Amino acid sequence: MTKPFYQTLCASLGLSLAAGLFQSWLHFQRGVDLYGLASFQSWFVIGNFIALITASLLLTYYDHKHFKAAFWAGLVATLISLATFFYLLLASLYPLLGQYLRVATGMGTFAFLVYGVTLATSGARSRPWLRWAGYVVAILYGIQLAALVWFNDIPPYPPPPPWI
């Protein structure tokens, strides 16, 4: 591991954080109508591309530092996230495929919850920043999973037009 690698990893983590915060800010400004905008699909692709680069850099770091549990949990979470990304992208293009949106997001959320717990409890916890990242990831994805389960029977917003 070289200094440029660590700098690239930090820059990628910062870019991922900035993209997530920007999307959250847009969500609070526009509401759930944000996801129906024509430009959201491009933003979704770019955000997932940034996340994929960050995940590959983190996986390289875990492998180099011999954090095997964190590596495998991160790899599984990344692959499930990538599969969910392609499913959501196809479901936005072909609405007939959109029957299992909650299952896809639930699987991705659960995978990252396991990844966060693994970071906080495995050998990667020897690095304080990874331990705290594991705590934060586990808490955030635990809250998201609880919200997905809690609001499971709530109809989606906006309601479909009456002619459908």
Image: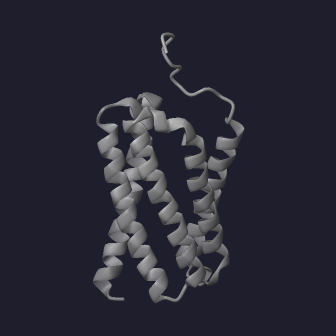
| Front position in the image: 21 or 65 | 65
Q: At which x and y percent is residue 62?
A: 49, 81
Which residue is located at x 47 percent, y 56 percent? Answer: 83
Q: At which x and y percent is residue 151?
A: 67, 35
Which residue is located at x 42 percent, y 28 percent? Answer: 33
The quadrant holding residue 59 is: bottom left
Q: At which x and y percent is residue 16?
A: 39, 59
Quarter of the N terminus within the rendering: bottom left
Left or right, residue 66 beside residue 48: right
Left or right, residue 25 beside residue 100: left
Which residue is located at x 65 percent, y 80 percent? Answer: 122
Which residue is located at x 40 percent, y 37 percent? Answer: 92
Q: Is residue 162 above or below residue 106?
A: above
Name of the residue lying farthest toward the top: 163
Number of marks drawn: 0
* Colour theme: one colour
Name of the residue lying farthest toward the front: 96
Q: Is residue 12 above or below residue 109?
A: below
Q: Is residue 133 above or below residue 43?
A: below
Q: At which x and y percent is residue 115?
A: 59, 67
The quadrant holding residue 30 is: top left
| Front position in the image: 81 or 11 | 81
